[in-house]
Image (cartoon, rainbow, N blue to C red):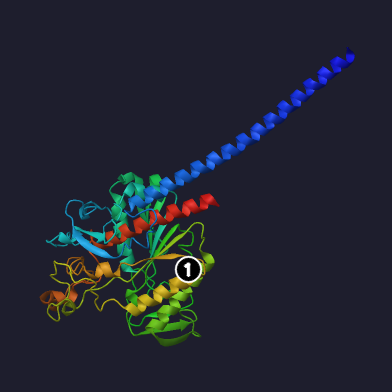
C-alpha cells in the first residue's frame, strides 16, 4: 500500500514537472512568436512610411529623391491661384532691399511662378509641418546677402502662422547673427553673415565694402563657433569671389608680421572651401546636423546675353527666359566644379553635404530681380536717375519670388533627409 502511494506521488510530481516544462516551452514559443510579430509589424510600418514619403514627393517607392526625381531639372509654370505663398506686406520681417512692390513695382507676375520638376512635383510648403520638424532645433543660413535673402524668404514663409507674441527677432555677434525665434516651437531660423566663409576684411555685416578684398584662408573658427551646434546648416559663397585676383593673408589682421599675396581667385576659392570642409569633417556631429550648400545665384546684368539691346540689363524686364538650359555669363561653371569636387571629397570621407543646385532654374528668371524697385541706401545722383540701368539691382531677388522656390527645395530635402536619418537611427 505504501509502495503504491509512493508510486502515485512520483507520478504526480512527474506530471507537475512536465506541466512546468510545457509551460516554459510554451512561454518561449510565445516570446518568439511575439518577437516575430513585432518585427513584422515594424517592417510593415516602415514599408508604409517609405511609401507615403515617396508619394509625398510623387516618385515611386523604389526611386530615391536624387535619382529619378531630379528636383533641379524642370520648368516654371504660371500659377496665380496658389502663388505667392505669402504677401509681401504681411511679412513682419520683410527686407527693404527685397520689397519690390513696396518700392513701386507695378507688374507683380514675378510672384506667380511655380517650379515644376520634369518627373515629379515639389511637395507643397507647409509652415506648420516645418516648424514641427524644427521644434527645439536651429536652422542656420551661413553666407552673403543672397543667403540672407533666402533666410528672409524662409522667415516670411513661416511668419504668417505665428501670432505676434509667439515670435521674435534679435541680433548678436556684433550684428552678424540674426535670429528669428518661433517661441511655441522653441525653434530658430537664423542667418550668419560670412560672405567668404573664412575670415576676411568684409566680415562686418554693415561696413563690408572694401577696395581690396583679403581673406585669411586658413581661419574659420571665428565664424564657425556661432553655428557649431546647429541642426540644419545651409551654406553659400560665390558673389564676393567674382574678381580675378584675391589677396590672401597668412597671419592676423593688424599683425605687422602678416604676409599678403595676390593669388588667382579660383585657387583661393578652392583653398577656402577646403578649410571649410576640413572644419566640417572634424566638428560636425553626424548624428545631429544636416548640411546643405546652395549653388551660385545667377545675375542678369548683360541683356545682350538673352537677345536684348547691348548695355541693358534686368531693368524693365517682365518676362522670363524661355530658352531651355540658358546659361548666362553671370554664373561660373569652373567655380561650380570646385564646389562639386570638394563635396565629393567630403562624401568619400563619410560626410554628406546636399547640394541645392538652384543655378539653372534661377537663370531663367531675369525678371525676378529688384532692379530699381528697392530702398536706395545712398541718395541717387542726377546722372543715375537719368539712366536707371546704372543702378538697377540685377543680383538680389524680389520677395515673394525666386528664393521661395529655393526654400521649397530645401523643405523637400529637410523632410526626405531628416526622416531617412531618423529611421536609420531607429534601426541602430
Screen quadrant of the N terminus = top right
Q: Quadrant of residue 202?
A: bottom left
Residue 101 at x, y = what percent?
17, 59
Q: Quadrant of residue 149?
A: bottom left
In the picture, measured across the screen, residue 167 lies left or right of residue 81, that is right
Q: Residue at 47% x, 66% y: name it.
A: 224
| Secondary element at image label 1 | helix
Q: Residue at 81% x, 17% y: name it.
A: 8
Residue 265 at x, y = what percent?
38, 83
In the picture, measured across the screen, residue 22 lies left or right of residue 266, that is right
Disc 1 target residue: 347
| Residue placed most toward the observer, 322 or 261 | 322
Question: Where 294 sits versus 413, above or below?
Answer: below
* Label 1 crowd (10 A; few <14 / some 14-19 / many >=20): some
Residue 326 at x, y = what percent?
22, 73
Residue 228 at x, y = what percent?
48, 62
| Residue placed most toward the observer, 177 or 105 | 105
Whether residue 216 appears in this view of the structure is no
Q: Quadrant of residue 264?
A: bottom left
Question: Where 30 sits versus 153, above or below?
Answer: above
In the picture, measured across the screen, residue 66 lies left or right of residue 398, that is right
Question: Where 199 sits versus 45, above or below?
Answer: below
Question: Where 22 sits versus 299, above or below?
Answer: above
> How many labels sit on residues?
1
Whether residue 314 appears in this view of the structure is yes
| Residue placed most toward the observer, 274 or 75 | 75
Amino acid at each position: 500500500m505504501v509502495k503504491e502511494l509512493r508510486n502515485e506521488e512520483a507520478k504526480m510530481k512527474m506530471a507537475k514537472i512536465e506541466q512546468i516544462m510545457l509551460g516554459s516551452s510554451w512561454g518561449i514559443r510565445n516570446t518568439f512568436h511575439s518577437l516575430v510579430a513585432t518585427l513584422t509589424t515594424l517592417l510593415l510600418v516602415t514599408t508604409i512610411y517609405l511609401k507615403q514619403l515617396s508619394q509625398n514627393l510623387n516618385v515611386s517607392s523604389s526611386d530615391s529623391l536624387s535619382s529619378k526625381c531630379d528636383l533641379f531639372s524642370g520648368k516654371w509654370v504660371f500659377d496665380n491661384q496658389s502663388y505667392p505663398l505669402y504677401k509681401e506686406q504681411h511679412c513682419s520681417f520683410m527686407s527693404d532691399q527685397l520689397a519690390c512692390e513696396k518700392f513701386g513695382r507695378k507688374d507683380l507676375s514675378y510672384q506667380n511662378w511655380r517650379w515644376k520638376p520634369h518627373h515629379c512635383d515639389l511637395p507643397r510648403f507647409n509652415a506648420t509641418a516645418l516648424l514641427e520638424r524644427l521644434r527645439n532645433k536651429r536652422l542656420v543660413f551661413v553666407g552673403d546677402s543672397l543667403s540672407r535673402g533666402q533666410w528672409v524668404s524662409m522667415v516670411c514663409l513661416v511668419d504668417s502662422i505665428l501670432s505676434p507674441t509667439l515670435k521674435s527677432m534679435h541680433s548678436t555677434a556684433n550684428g552678424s547673427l540674426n535670429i528669428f525665434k518661433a517661441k511655441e516651437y522653441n525653434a530658430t531660423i537664423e542667418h550668419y553673415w560670412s560672405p567668404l566663409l573664412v575670415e576676411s576684411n568684409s566680415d562686418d555685416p554693415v561696413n563690408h565694402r572694401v577696395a581690396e578684398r583679403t581673406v585669411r584662408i586658413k581661419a574659420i573658427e571665428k565664424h564657425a563657433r556661432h553655428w557649431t551646434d546647429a541642426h540644419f546648416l545651409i551654406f553659400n559663397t560665390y558673389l564676393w569671389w567674382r574678381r580675378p585676383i584675391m589677396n590672401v593673408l597668412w597671419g592676423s589682421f593688424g599683425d605687422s608680421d602678416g604676409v599678403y599675396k595676390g593669388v588667382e581667385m579660383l585657387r583661393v576659392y578652392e583653398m577656402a572651401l577646403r578649410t571649410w570642409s576640413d572644419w566640417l569633417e572634424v566638428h560636425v556631429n553626424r548624428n545631429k546636423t544636416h548640411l546643405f550648400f546652395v549653388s551660385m545665384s545667377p545675375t542678369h546684368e548683360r541683356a545682350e546675353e538673352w537677345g536684348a539691346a547691348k548695355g541693358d540689363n534686368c531693368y524693365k524686364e517682365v518676362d522670363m527666359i524661355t530658352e531651355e538650359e540658358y546659361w548666362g555669363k553671370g554664373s561660373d561653371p569652373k567655380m561650380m566644379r570646385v564646389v562639386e569636387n570638394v563635396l565629393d571629397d567630403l562624401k568619400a570621407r563619410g560626410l554628406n553635404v546636399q547640394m541645392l543646385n538652384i543655378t539653372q532654374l534661377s537663370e531663367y528668371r531675369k525678371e525676378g530681380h529688384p532692379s530699381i524697385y528697392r530702398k536706395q541706401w545712398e541718395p541717387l545722383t542726377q546722372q543715375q536717375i537719368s539712366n536707371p540701368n546704372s543702378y538697377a539691382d540685377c543680383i538680389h531677388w524680389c520677395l515673394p519670388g525666386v528664393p521661395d522656390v529655393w526654400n521649397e527645395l530645401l523643405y523637400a530635402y529637410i523632410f526626405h533627409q531628416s526622416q531617412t536619418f531618423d529611421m536609420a537611427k531607429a534601426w541602430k
